Amino acid sequence: KGKRAFIAGVADDNGYGWAIAKSLAAAGAQILVGTWVPALNIFESSLRRGKFDESRVLPDGSLMEITKVYPLDAVFDNPEDVPEDIKTNKRYAGSSKWTVQEVAESVKEDFGTIDILVHSLANGPEVTKPLLETSRNGYLAVLSASSYSYVSLLKHFLPIMNPGGSSISLTYIASEKIIPGYGGGMSSAKAALESDTRVLAFEAGRKRKIRVNTISAGPLRSRAAKAIGFIDMMIDYSIANAPLQKELSADEVGNSAAFLASPLASAITGTVLYVDNGLNAMGVGV
Ligand code: NAD
């Protein structure tokens, strides 16, 4: 029987979340996505108007179907957490049940269970600032949006994940090596995400036989990456210096996620899988 995937962090057709959705759909999975509340209207209307039809084409020529789009803000766990200014904000007021707990409940009501959980989101208010100039609030906010959001998603979805299921997040090598410009504590957030991948692999493995892995992806010109401001430089650097001198396509990361989610990876958990044309293995640029 086909598997069901929930992918958090899809709001256009440029990012890793979209590419992962496509690879999972091509492998026969049913696709549910979680879209950041402020981006929901544009995403849904673009989908409806056919703006993404070209990028919905799967290898067999059919179009990827997104069975349901859920509004989501992964920095809030339940309605009690939501402050007044967000509740009354007009970009949020039009949607409901978008905290992590409520989304998991809605998915349970609609579909019962899932097999695959993907976290493809990150956000930091001070990501363009060096760490030395990052405020406490900025640092805590990036950890909340980019690291704890994953702990929270897995915690709330785990009870509805079928044993043998798989959970995947996206990380970046700035967690372990100095990448100047990846600021605001985003490098710290990725270090936390990678460490949590190991601990969560243990806990979710023992509790429900769920595998937990993260993909350390190379640079992609996504919306989030453009906001950091140095993405073209990182792409050029990778093409110049990586063992494989080609631009990384989002589909290559999508296919790796489909592998990790499949029975082919049934003994792989707690790992950081590099999907970066091998750049991580270089010691110096040549
Ligand atoms: P993207 O813009 O496609 O994805 C980020 C998504 O996060 C967006 O859809 C945004 O709406 C969503 N989001 C932000 N805050 C949210 C919140 N509070 N609740 C719910 N959703 C929220 O960009 P991307 O680069 O594909 O990012 C996906 C993942 O890949 C991120 O974890 C990112 O750090 C990681 N990654 C990206 C690169 C790269 O070069 N693009 C490299 C390595 C890792």
Image (tube, grey):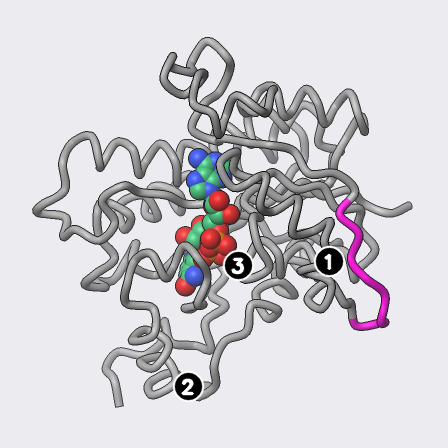
Q: 168 and 271: which one is in front? A: 168
Q: What stretch is highlighted in magenta?
A: 59-66
- In space, the residues marked 1 and 2 are separated at their CA atoms by 38 Å
Q: Can residue 129 be seen in this view?
A: yes
Q: Residue 50 carries which label?
A: 1
Q: In this view, does 67 lie above or below 23?
A: above
Q: Are marks 3 and 2 in contact (CB under 8 Å)?
A: no
Say whether mark 3 is within 8 Å of ligand 1.
Answer: yes
- In space, the residues marked 1 and 3 are separated at their CA atoms by 18 Å
Question: Mark 1 is on which residue type?
Answer: Gly
- Residue at mark 3: 15
Q: 214 and 124: which one is in front? A: 124
- Residue 273 percent coordinates (x, y): 50, 61
Q: Quadrant of residue 112?
A: top right
- Residue at mark 2: 243
Q: In which quarter of the image is residue 117?
A: top right
- Whether residue 61 is in magenta: the answer is yes
Q: In which quadrant is the C terminus drawn?
A: bottom left
For the residues carrying marks 1 and 3, which lies nearer the camera in this image?
1
Q: In this view, does 96 lie above or below 24?
A: above
**Of the image marks 1 and 3, the number of the one nearer the N terminus:** 3
- In space, the residues marked 3 and 2 are separated at their CA atoms by 24 Å
**Of the image marks 1 and 2, the number of the one nearer the N terminus:** 1
